[in-house]
Amino acid sequence: MSTGENDLATIVGPCALDMRLVTPDDAEYIHALRTDPAFNTHLSAVGGGVEAQRTWIEDYKHREKAGSQFYFIIETKSGQRCGLVRIYDITKDNFTWGSWILDRNKPPKAALESAFLIYLFAFEKLGLRRATFEVMRENKRTLAFHHRFGAHKTGEDETNFYFEYDAADFESCKDGFLKTLSPPPPAANDYLSQNPHLVIEDGVTIDHSVVFAPSDGPKTLVRKDAHIGAGAVIGVDLEIGWGANILPGAVVLSSVPANAVASGNPAKIIGYTTEVASENKTLVRSGPLNSRREAEIVPLNVGGAALYEMPMVIDMRGNLTVGEFEDSFPFPPKRYFAVFDVPSEKLRGEHAHYNCHQFLICLSGSCKALIDDGKSRLEVTLDSPDVGLYMPPLIWGTQYQYSRDAVLLVFASHGYDGDDYIRDYDSFRMLTSDE
Ligand SMILES: CC(C)(COP(=O)(O)OP(=O)(O)OC[C@H]1O[C@@H](n2cnc3c(N)ncnc32)[C@H](O)[C@@H]1OP(=O)(O)O)[C@@H](O)C(=O)NCCC(=O)NCCS
């Protein structure tokens, strides 16, 4: 069988390995493996030294050219040799394979991937139909491998067991093997080496096939503990905030705040990651409005924050809710402001205060409020004029997903003071950490 040389020179594996045809320069490596007692117990002995091996390879190269034998070096994707394997006795439909060794540099699943590549090569590149091979009776490890791979035992004698594995077997298992061999997510370092403008902080996880837009100027910063899902595209000159979660396939064209979950093209914030018990993750007040004579306070276990269900009078002429600053309020306000006409994709807040207390009531429509004390986070839906969210100082607050008709009224314990704001999430985490 004659085959195009270049076409067969390298067989690219789906995970950690490739195979390439041996050259005379591999003689020393092959000789060392074939004479290493850790690997050669169940293989036929090789005679002679390295030079004899070189001569053997030179001679073999003629058989390779004629398509009657293929001897491969198994190597890692970074080009480090980690084994050998050979296909021989090739007839019209059949072949056998052997001389299979994986050395101490083999990556995880190397046996599976190299066997997969041998069959891929023989069945799909050479168009052969069946492998027949033998394994020595005492070679328990290799026997177990072939058994697990799905080879059929066809016979045995005093020395060997005999097996078959055909193209249809491979075809039916191929997808399963590919799944098992799916590449590990590239380490952040791989992305760093390809994208010099990237800054990736500790604890970041990045799945495979993420694209960082190239840049020779502006930096892209991925903050601590952020996660970027498979296939996401990340623009330049932006920041993926601390603990943010970019969902697979998102196209991120602007900065994503700390702990936000972003999805879509262009990516929008669809929520926030929360670390509290799941039943508390989202508080939505549902059901009909109730009359209430006194404020009821629901602690939220996030840095002293609480929901206040304010006094409420249900009346046919129109309902009324009220708060007495001295009796039913957590602090005496000095200031109020109202937020309205917020485009739904916009975020507000995203800061904490050193001293100022705040009380948020969504008088009309709804919005989501995320509160974070540096250890726990909770998302609260504010959708009723009788519910107030109390945020003491040192709570990182973000409000988002405003409905079109949302009007958020905020009472503050202090007059405006720019120096009272903590606008950087890192500084906030440092201030609230126990260390
Ligand atoms: C034969 C040889 C190449 C097999 O390699 P191996 O690494 O020992 O093979 P294993 O059966 O332990 O399997 C290796 C890996 O593939 C995985 N694997 C094997 N079959 C698998 C299957 N069907 N599905 C999923 N995973 C499988 C194993 O779990 C193991 O994973 P890990 O590396 O992450 O632990 C090796 O033992 C060797 O060099 N032996 C000396 C020479 C020899 O005897 N050659 C055979 C002559 S016929």
Image (cartoon, grey):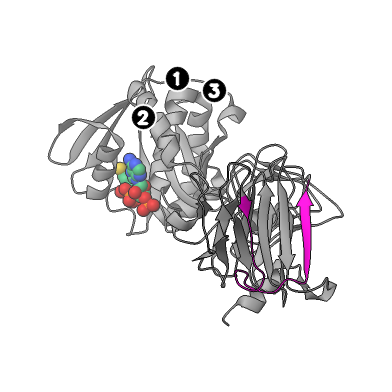
Ligand 1: does it lie within 8 Å of the C-beta at label 1? no
Q: Which image quarter: residue 161?
A: top left
Is 160 placed above or below 282 here? Answer: above
Q: Which residues are magenta?
A: 320-340
Q: Amino acid at mark 1?
A: Gly
Q: Earlier in the sequence, mark 1 or mark 3?
A: 3
Q: Which residue is mark 1?
A: 127
On residue 147, the disc is none
Q: Residue furthest top?
A: 92
Using the image as rendered, state which of residue 308 and residue 59 is in the foreground. 308
Q: Residue at x 70, y 36 (%)?
A: 265
Residue 28 position in % (x across, y down): 50, 54
Q: Which image quarter: residue 147?
A: top left
Q: Earlier in the sequence, mark 1 or mark 2?
A: 1
On the rendered structure, is 184 left or right of 102? right
On the rendered structure, is 430 left or right of 178? right
Residue 281 position in % (x across, y down): 50, 55
Q: Quadrant of the C terminus?
A: bottom right
**SS of the residue under disc 2:** helix
Q: Amino acid at mark 2?
A: Cys
**Disc 3 or disc 2, which is closer to the eye?**
2
Q: Which residue is mark 3?
A: 3
Q: Which image quarter: residue 354?
A: bottom right
On residue 173, the disc is 2
